[in-house]
Amino acid sequence: MSLPNAKHIEVGKSRGRVTVTIDDWELFDVVEDLLVEDHNLDFEYYTEVELEGRKCFVMHFAESVSIERIERAIRSIPEAEVERIWRLNNEL
């Protein structure tokens, strides 16, 4: 599910675990810092996948982490900030 403030970030579930898919490495780094440092939401590992011709980065969380906690944390990033970070490495 894409969040209204974060069109480059998608939160979902895979095999009973919350996943966060991000379509830019710089944005991934910022979201990782936010989740881990500000919200104490460590992910177990990440994978790289190609979606629609773009390299994406997927965080995989423990089964105990709720999708609501992840969404609440990501919603704290202003949409303009998500877009600004994404545009550092991407052109429209």
Image (tube, grey):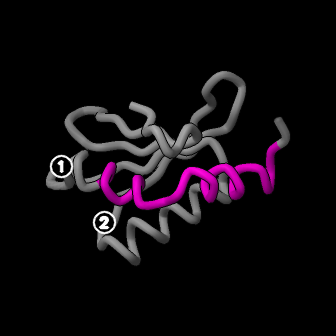
**Which mark lies nearer to you, 2 or 1?**
2
Query: Which residue is found at the position 18% from the left and 49% from the top?
Result: 63
Extreme-left residue of the structure? 64
Looking at the image, is mark 2 or mark 1 earlier in the sequence? 2
**Which of the image's four quarters has the C terminus?**
top right
Counting other residues with Cα less than 10 Å from the Cα at mark 1, is it few (<14), some (14-19), or many (20 or more)? Answer: few
Q: Amino acid at mark 1?
A: Glu
Query: Which residue is found at the position 49% from the left and 59% from the top?
Result: 77
Provide the residue span drawn in magenta: 70-90
Query: Which residue is found at the position 29% from the left and 35% from the top?
Result: 13
- Mark 2: which secondary structure? loop
- The residue that label 2 is drawn on is 41
- The residue that label 1 is drawn on is 63
Q: Verify whether residue 67 appears in magenta.
A: no
Vertical placement of residue 39 versus 76, above or below: below
Q: Amino acid at mark 2?
A: Leu
Extreme-right residue of the structure? 91
**Which of the image's four quarters has the N terminus?**
top left
The foreground one among 55 and 76 is 76
Q: Position of residue 57 (x, y in %)?
A: 56, 46
- Mark 1: which secondary structure? loop
Query: Which residue is found at the position 36% from the left and 49% from the top?
Result: 60
Seen in the image, is 17 located left or right of residue 91? left
Q: Position of residue 47 (x, y in %)?
A: 50, 46
Residue 25: which disc? none
Q: Position of residue 64 (x, y in %)?
A: 14, 54
Q: Verify whether residue 83 appears in magenta.
A: yes
Vertical placement of residue 50 versus 87, above or below: above
Distance from the alpha carbon under mark 2 to that under mark 1: 12 Å
Q: Of helix, strand and loop, which mostly describes the magenta segment?
A: helix
Extreme-bottom residue of the structure? 37
